[in-house]
Amino acid sequence: MRPATRASTRAALALLALATGPLPAAAQIPPHARWQTLTTPHTRITFSPGLDSLAREAGRHAEHAYARLAAEFGPPPDGPIDILITDQTDLANAFATPFPSNRIVVFARPPLDDLALGYHADWLELVIAHELTHIFHLDRAGRWARAARKILGRVPSAWPLFPAVGTPQWAIEGLATYFESRLTGYGRTRGTYHEMLLRTAALEGRFDRIDQASGYGASWPSGQRWYAYGSLFFDHLARSHGPDVPRRVLERTAGAVIPPSLAFDRIGRRATGTSFSDAWDEWRNEMRRQARARADSLGTLTRPERLTRHGYFALYPRVGPDGRVAFAASDGRDQTATRILDPTTGEVSQLARRNGLGVADWLPDGSALVTAQLEYDGPYRIVSDLYRVDRDGREHRLTWGARLAQPDVDGALVGGASLDPVGFAAIVAAAEER
């Protein structure tokens, strides 16, 4: 592979952001690791030491998904697809790009605490189905694009070389999310979380228009809207116009004579007989009717009392010995933080900022909280460690590179950090020695 120029590298990164959404900080892969590679008929699986069995499983899932996607979409991409599996971060994520070749990166950690991704039988199967759909979609080219690529190569660009790269984010992520469920029987289209998001939006009169569904900002549900709206809209199109709608959309996008970014409704009209905008309005009305009918049937249930109004996420409430409630909060406007609710007054105060959402638990005497946070461990690793947060908000790091999460003081929690008082005292003593 020829080395990329600085300008082409910047262009590739910009288009990758458009194609796959914002990348986590942990997307920087350690170049000095002792990488190993195994091959399958259509992929090259590269992995870090210790992930041999996971790599073999990834190859099996990739070949199965490849065959299904080739049957669904038609001609597959040319050449092998690179899949890199790395365990240098405690984030659950993955990304795909067609530049400068078709490649996928998967972070090995499963989504133990992700509300949207909770419905899966095998995380690796789900994420490979999703990312491989991106490759089939973004690499797809019509006659003019194939001819141009022979002359110019895989220049990072949208139309006419890679027409799908210029399509709306709800279409790019929605198609991949729809197929993660179609191929595995699980995933976000089959789960309840995305349906809950849209049902609530329909009931509250804030169901996004099609021109809002690719937005990213401080309004709920932020970057999740691409996945939720896009996947369930493709599900609606498949039910209304036939299960081969995705293939027709891909074919029309790949062969578009007008850039899809300028005339995407034309793609919808040629693929289904109706524009995407009109189909979206029809779907939105259907969702409103369904949501209202369900709300009416549940109207006799006990109504909860709302305790916080900060928006976005208020997760993992833990009641302390004095009755105060600690929870993780992210409102899309301020820094993510541990907040404290006084149930007697309803007052919510910020205890301390934190590097992401996660479980916290009180010490038995209520003097402090133990929480887990992601932090850099060198330039390439982001791992989860334990911290003590005192009642005055002062923070003390307790472990370094321990990869511990979901602390449960004096209890048991599978997959997390279970700390009895003696064990916790030992961790505190070791931290103080540092």
Image (tube, rainbow, N blue to C red):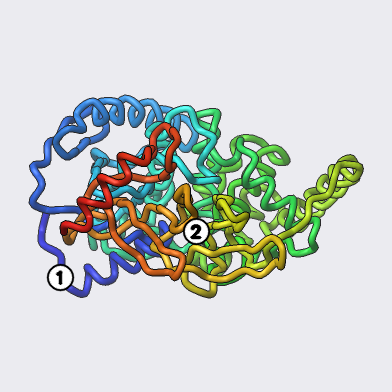
How many residues crowd mark 1 within 10 Å: few (<14), some (14–19), many (20+)? few
Q: Is residue 354 left or right of residue 50?
A: right
Give percent across and percent down for residue 283.
75, 51
From this view, report whether residue 16 is shown above or below residue 48.
below
* Residue nearest the observer in this picture, 390 or 242: 390
For the point 20% across and 53% down, which residue is it? 29
Q: How many marks?
A: 2
Any part of residue 212 in sight = no
Could you tell which of marks 1 and 2 lies nearer the N-terminus? 1
For the point 91% across and 42% down, which residue is it? 300
- Looking at the rendered structure, which numbered label has been put on residue 186? none
Residue holding disc 1 = 5
Q: Is residue 298 left or right of residue 258?
A: right
Give percent across and percent down for residue 260.
52, 63
Circle 2 — which element? loop
Give percent across and percent down for residue 419.
37, 40
Residue holding disc 2 = 256
